Image: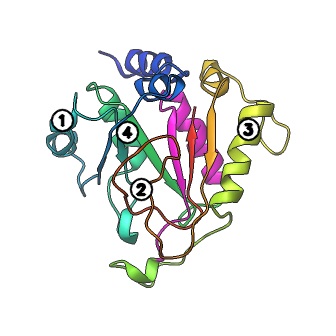
Amino acid sequence: MAPRQAGEQAGERGCGTGALARAFGVGRFVVTAEVAPPVTTDPETLLRRALPLRGLATAVNVTDSAGARAHLSSIVAGFLLSRHGIEPIVQMTCRDRNRLALQSDLLGALALGLGNVLILTGDDPRAGDQPDTKPVFDLDSRGLLALAERMRRERCLPTGTAIDGPSTCCWASPTLRSIRRPHGARTGCSPRSRREPISCRRNSAWIWT
């Protein structure tokens, strides 16, 4: 299957019709899992980790350089999972990108049909394996959440530039939730599901598009 065709099919699934969105829409209990993309350029390495979860989890959370360590892009990993029957939840952290890059990544994720995005502030680079890394934090997770919601609602960038293309349908009917928790507390990320807690960062937020 050509990448364009796969992307179009993924886009159709992402426009409010994914298994996760449907389950939340009817209040059904969901199970999610998490996969940390490996340090690889071989898709098969990622798939060996993730494919055992197919059919077991409603959706699979794909981390974004968790622990402040470089890994395969969460957007690329999410797209690969979507092509193999796994609905991804793509993490997007504020640590590594300024607002221009974050806007571009939101557009790119939706163009690939990746309709579930988990926005996180991100781990402190000093805790990672390259502690001299300069953090960006142009926006925090609340700021990025507000930006994403504005892009969805107004169908334009903050500059007023219109967002074109069929992928904008993914923003038509989102379920939007923001979670704030005390520093160091452990909590489930989704307010609409019961789940074992994962390592969400402070001021984490879900966007279900």
Q: Which residue is mark 4?
A: 78
Callout 1 amino acid? Leu
Q: Check if mark 4's residue and mark 3's residue have beta carbons within 8 Å.
A: no
Q: Is residue 124 above or below residue 99?
A: below
Q: Position of residue 24 (x, y in %)?
A: 50, 29
Q: Is residue 61 magenta?
A: no
Q: Check if mark 4's residue and mark 2's residue have beta carbons within 8 Å.
A: no
Front-lying residue, 195 or 40: 195
Q: Earlier in the sequence, mark 1 or mark 3?
A: 1
Q: Check if mark 2's residue and mark 3's residue have beta carbons within 8 Å.
A: no
Q: Is residue 103 magenta?
A: yes
Q: Which mark is residue 64?
A: 2
Where disc 1 sits, the SS reads helix
Q: Earlier in the sequence, mark 1 or mark 4?
A: 1
Q: Position of residue 172 (x, y in %)?
A: 67, 23
Quadrant the N terminus occupies: top left
Q: Earlier in the sequence, mark 2 or mark 1?
A: 1
Q: Which residue is situated farthest in the right direction here? A: 160
Q: Which residue is mark 3?
A: 151
Where disc 3 sits, the SS reads helix
Q: Which mark is residue 51?
A: 1
Where disc 4 sits, the SS reads helix
Callout 4 amino acid? Gly
Callout 2 amino acid? Asp
Which residues make up the magenta segment? 100-124
